[in-house]
Amino acid sequence: MRQEPPVELLRLSTAGSVDDGKSTLIGRLLHDSKSIFEDQLAAVQDFSRRRGDERPDLALLTDGLRAEREQGITIDVAYRYFATPRRRFILADTPGHVQYTRNMVTGASTANLAIVLVDARQGVLEQTRRHAYIASLLRIPHLVMAVNKMDLVGHDEVTFRRIESELRELATRLDVQDVAFVPISALHGDNVVDRSTNMPWYSGPTLLHHLENVHIASDRNMQDVRFPVQWVIRPQSDRHAAYRGYAGQVAGGVMRPGDEVVVLPSGIGTRLARIEEIGPDGMPREVAEAYPPMSVTVHLAADVDVSRGDMICRPGNRPTVSQSFDARVCWLGERPLQPRTRYALKHTTRNARAMVESIAYRLDIQTGHRDTAAQQLSANDIGRITVKTTAPIMHDPYHRSRATGAVIQVEE
């Protein structure tokens, strides 16, 4: 019996300024794609009616916190899942308020695509630029600039083209390869799931059609073999004395049994003996190859000392191994980031202690100016720093690998 290939998964996040309609857009996507239960819709209708709304407020499908419903803004990141025959989706509804920029970074950090909403009445605001820049900083491969609330400007093409022109100029200063522009009304559903009859001048795809068809297969790094070891599976009894495997998620490249590999940071070389994954029956089964984002267990031909946090790669294609590196950061902590301060650092599956040696600059999102005199980074600031760690870190440039080019730095 022929097995159908798995339906591809697209992770996406929303971004934009306060009240641009991010939660309403996701609610519309869920509603019009028939991805919500009847009791969920009934609860939203009941709450909206008791609040005096003329129509169901679809934003309530994602604004789950009581404070969000009372204030009418998104505070936390809300994740929702839905699927169409063409693709599965995980949506992260992220806050628009500058106070919660850290939550936007969290929700967008694993996204394949970001939707940046713009209120057609307001145009491009500072927070629009901030979120677009953060999307670029996080190397999100695909960006959709959705000009929302077109119904409130009479579905005017001139208004859309003016905003589109400003967004295109902004996109030229961002490191994003794929940018699309869509005029929508999330409240009424224009160009969200179904094509709008109110904007015949727009000939592009609807938002959902674009999400279903955007090409993401080539976004994964299939060249550089990177396998951070998450768990060492040791023998638990004499019966399994010969079993020793190394479990984790493939971060890059394609691995096959027989390939020559090297374990970092030790630099000891060996070969891949076999690769296993957990099958549908819950039992391990051998596979002919492993690639991102598969979670597998690899077995080595030689008895090599391998620990959690080590990385398996190809001998002729290794990441940089160092205890000092530069990084662009979006600082999320309540206390400012300052030089000579010690932090805990997490990179893939490796943990280390770190110290910020210096701050190269703090970036002004509005002007693009680099403040080289900055002595600290406050909450939500973006800047470039130099970090020194107590243990070697196996890293790649972030533009080459988001998985091995990113770190999380935490206050101790």
Image (cartoon, grey):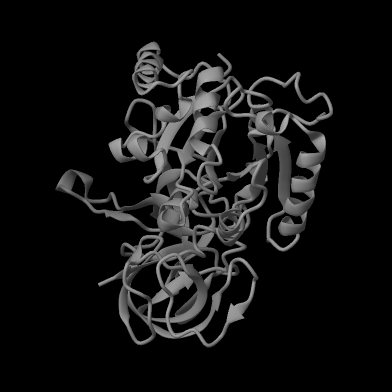
Q: Nearer the viewer, residue 330 or 140?
A: 330
* Residue 392 spot, x, y in % from top left: 40, 77
Name the residue rendered at 62%, 63% in the picture.
399
Picture quarter containing residue 8? top right
Q: Is residue 289 above or below residue 404?
A: above
> Does any portion of residue 304 appear in the rendered image?
no
Q: How many marks?
A: 0
Q: Nearer the viewer, residue 14 or 267?
A: 14
- Location of the C terminus by quadrant is bottom left
Q: Which residue reaches farthest front? A: 52
Name the residue rendered at 67%, 48% in the picture.
123
> Does any portion of residue 260 appear in the rendered image?
yes
Name the residue rendered at 45%, 74% in the picture.
267
* Residue 143 spot, x, y in % from top left: 65, 47
* Residue 402 spot, x, y in % from top left: 54, 58
* Residue 312 spot, x, y in % from top left: 45, 62
Q: Is residue 160 above or below residue 29?
A: below
Q: Is residue 202 left or right of residue 206?
A: right
Q: Nearer the viewer, residue 361 or 125?
A: 125
Q: Is residue 274 above or below residue 323?
A: above
Picture quarter containing residue 154? top right
Name the residue rendered at 68%, 32% in the picture.
150
- Location of the N terminus by quadrant is top right
